[in-house]
Each structure stands twice: as structure tokens, then as C-alpha cells.
Image: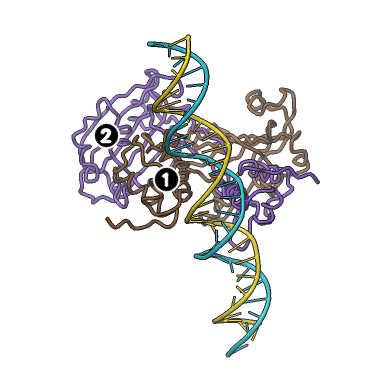
Chain colours: A purple, B brown, C cyan, D yellow
Amino acid sequence: MNTPTFRNWQSVQDEVLRRIHAREWPPGELIPNEADLAIEFGCARSTVNRALRSLADSGLLDRRRKAGTRVAAQPIAKATIDIAVIRNEVEEHGATYGYQLISRSVAIPPAPVSGTMKTKAQDKLLHVRALHLADDTAYAVEDRWINTAVVPAAVAEPFDRLSANEWLMQHAPYTHGDIAFSAVQADQQDADVLGVPPLSALFAIDRVTWDTDASVTKVRLLFAPGYKLRTQL
Amino acid sequence: MNTPTFRNWQSVQDEVLRRIHAREWPPGELIPNEADLAIEFGCARSTVNRALRSLADSGLLDRRRKAGTRVAAQPIAKATIDIAVIRNEVEEHGATYGYQLISRSVAIPPAPVSGTMKTKAQDKLLHVRALHLADDTAYAVEDRWINTAVVPAAVAEPFDRLSANEWLMQHAPYTHGDIAFSAVQADQQDADVLGVPPLSALFAIDRVTWDTDASVTKVRLLFAPGYKLRTQL
DNA sequence: AGGACTATTATGTACGCACATAAAAACATT
DNA sequence: AATGTTTTTATGTGCGTACATAATAGTCCT
């Protein structure tokens, strides 16, 4: 048997992938250990490790110390979604980006907002509503609350030219965030802003970002009908 | 200056993250090269490499050979979404999973379907519609087309007890897939099946999986109102 | 000044070794 | 048989070296 040698981790990965797809290593099955594969592939164990670790990261393999490596029984598809700044998203579609501030105020938020942002019920926050346009047609409405205790500089920002979306990206660091995607019916207000019939189905992205344990901002983006979030797996 | 030594790649990563968040290394700025960081952190260059590579994978750093490593100006948030088998998703919420086959037939698909699946216009495909339940209430409708030329064994499957969702996971390998999320209005048929008012906003997942260059299956999942797809970033 | 070639440099990765760590398996003890 | 302890083993990671590769910076020639 003339085994070709696999000199780099990508080719090892490709070969492992081939065996998984070809069902040579069926789902749930234990595969040979790193040391043996290294001998078979004619490379160092660390190279095999790199390849297998990468596949484990993408969910195709389950690895446990001592127990060994097995092909994931249910390859939970891990779709990675890039959430870009809206301007970039629009411009990547070849359209001209536009922005309109709808309202800007400092107010006590409704209870659900202060609840998810973990601010005190009577704390005032900065509330910004704005419209993002692609080629002069409505693309998405942004409804945002900003924790001015965490981002005091935001109080001085008018947000009439530069969207809060972009300003915060540059000025407000965050450590982590929660994000949720859903479908909602347009209420009268949002329908008017977007120029669509009431009760239209809108794609919603809700995001809350945190700096350590304090919320930075909470935003809901409602996209005009037809919007699709695409990715590969 | 008493520099603590960073003995493992995770602690190096944490320190780099801290500097980014603290704006010691602002967005867009070039950071010291691996060799220098290795000296500063008191570890090997490969350890620094591992830490920085991991951060680059998650989009926080931009790295280019010779040009060096810089903090991403626009930290494109990469949200990873786990797309599990529906049964698991339901059971993880602590609910009881139920399944009902609605229809199963072999038919010539409408043009958009054969178009996206790259099958010949007159090729017959297996068409399965089914309902997924959580605690006896409708959770999602599945509308699926299966390429029987690629998965001939599917023809013999009734799909009356085991959903196509699960059966395909076990029997139909795929190399890659496209996925799209959107919001759609429920038509009369889907509204009836889900037991919701017509025109309700439904969360839709459209997925096409491929084995090399042939489509395996195309599925649209419509989730009952209230469904949210959550993740972290 | 402009273009073609060369040197430099930072990241990318391979290798081999060593040791850490988690967890299963074997063994001993009650 | 049930429980606690030790051994074994596969993965996880660190280190230092070497070389590959891409892209910039510099040099030379016209």
C-alpha cells in the first residue's frame, strides 16, 4: 500500500473529512488515536492534533481526553454569522447607504428594557431611533437604548449624521453580548417608518452588549420585508 | 516593573483581550509582533501565535504576513449559531417532542426548487411535509424536498414516525450547505397547520445541503410565533 | 520618475520532545 | 457488590528550532 504522506495539517484535515463523508468512519465511531494517525499520515502528532482540533471546533468531531476522538453522531451544524455594521452590509450589496435620525431623547426606559439592561428602574437612558436606507429605500429601523453611565460621551453625540451603530463601534468597548433573531409583525409606527403595510413580517435582531457586568447598549433592528440573513455551513 | 509571566495561551489571550478592551491597543492599531510579545510575556512565540490566531479567528484581530497584526477596526461580530436536530432543540427546553407527518409524495418540484437544487426541471423529487410539536403544541412546520438520485434509500422511508430531519442526519452525508434566515407571513395553509392566525409573522430557516456538487435536500422550516434563535458573541 | 529585481520581516506552520490533565479501566479494600 | 485508590492512556499544551510564504521596503538600472 503506497500511502501518500500528508505534509500539512490542512491535507490531513481534508483526508479525515473524506473518510467521514465516505462513511469509512461512520457517525459515532471512534477513530484511531493521534499517534497512530501521525504514523499513518507520515507527519508529527502535533500536525494531526491541529487538524483534528480544528474539526472538533467546527463540531464534526467529539474529543475527550483518554476517551479518544469520535465522529459526531449528530453533526450539530455550526453556522457562523457575521454581523457587520449596517453601512458595510448595505454597501457590500452594491447599494448606496443612507441614514436618518428619527428621534433622540433621554428618558426612563420601560421596565422590560431596564430589566434586560440591569439598570435601576428610575435611571434615565439615552434613547435613539433611526432609519437605515439602501438606495433611498428603507432598509432597517434601529431602536436603541444607551447606558450613559457606561458611555458618558454618548450624551454629547447628536447622532444626526453618524449612526449610533457606527459611533458605538468606535467608542464603546464591550466584552460580550447576547443576540437573538426572531420574526415580528410590524406595528403601525414601524410600518410607517419603513413604508410597508402594517402587520408585515419583519426580521428582528435584538442585541445587548456588555462591558464586564454593566450593559452598554440594547438595540432592536427591524429589517424591511425581503431581508435574509445568509451563511454557509 | 514586575511582569507576571503568562504561562499558557489562554492567559496570553486574556491579557491581549484586556489591552484591547482597555484601549491600550485601540482599534486599527498595529500591535507588537509575536517575537516581542513572547519576550514580554515570558513564553514561546508559538504560544503567542496560538493566542493571536484564536483571536483572529473570532474576528478581533487582523493579521497579515509581514504587515503584522492589528486590532480590527470594525470588530465584525461573529455569532456562531448551533443548528441542532429539532427533537434535541425541543427537549433541551424541557418539553416533550412530538412529530406528525402531513404529506409525502413524489412529484416534480416547482421551478424555484429545482432551480436552487440544480436538478433537471422534469426530475421528480421526494416531497415531505411534517409538523414538529413541543408539548402537543405546534413548534415548526417542515417542508422538504429530497433528491432521490443522491439519496435513493429515502424512497423506501415512510417518514411517519421518524422525521426526515433526523433520518437524513443519519443517512445522508453532506459536504456543505447554504442557510438563510428570514421572516415571512403565514399563508392560509401554514397558518392552519400551526394553528395561528393567517398573516402571522413566522421565523423561517431555509437550508440546502450539498454532497460535493449535487444537492441532497432543501428544507424550509417555519417556526410558530414567539420563536427566537439565540446566541452569544 | 518609473519599473524590475532583491532583501527584509512578520506571520504560518512543521517537527520532536516533554509534561500536564482528564477520564476510563484496573485493582484493591471494605 | 459497592466503594475508594492507583494505573494507564489519549488528548491538551508548551517549548525551541527550522523553514515556508507573503508582502512590504529597499535597491538598482534605465
Observer-nearest residue: B132 or D25? D25
**Residue B1's x, y, as percent?**
27, 55
Q: Return the residue at label 2.
A: A128
| Quarter residue B112 falls in | top right
- Residue at x 48% of width, y 49% of height: B46
**Between A44 and A18, which is closer to the camera in this rendering?**
A44
Q: Label 2 lies in what chain?
A: A
Quadrant placement of the C terminus of chain A? top right
Q: Are marks 2 and 1 in contact (CB under 8 Å)?
A: no
Image spot of residue A172 (x, y percent): 29, 40
Q: Chain of mark 1?
A: B
Few, some or many residues within 10 Å of mark 2 (<14, 14–19, 20+): many
Left or right: where A78 falls relative to A88: right
Residue found at x 37% / y 34% = B74
Residue shown at the point (34%, 22%) measured from the top left: A98
Check disc 2 and report its element: helix, strand or loop: strand
Q: Is residue B176 visible?
A: yes
Who is closer to the viewer here, A9 or B65? B65
Q: Establish if D20 lies above or below A73.
A: above
In the image, is A96 to the left or to the right of B187? Answer: left
Label ID, residue B35: 1
Callout 1 amino acid:
Ala
Q: What is the secondary structure assignment of the residue under circle 1?
A: helix
* Amino acid bearing label 2: Val
Residue A35 in the image, given as x and y percentages of width and height: 66, 56
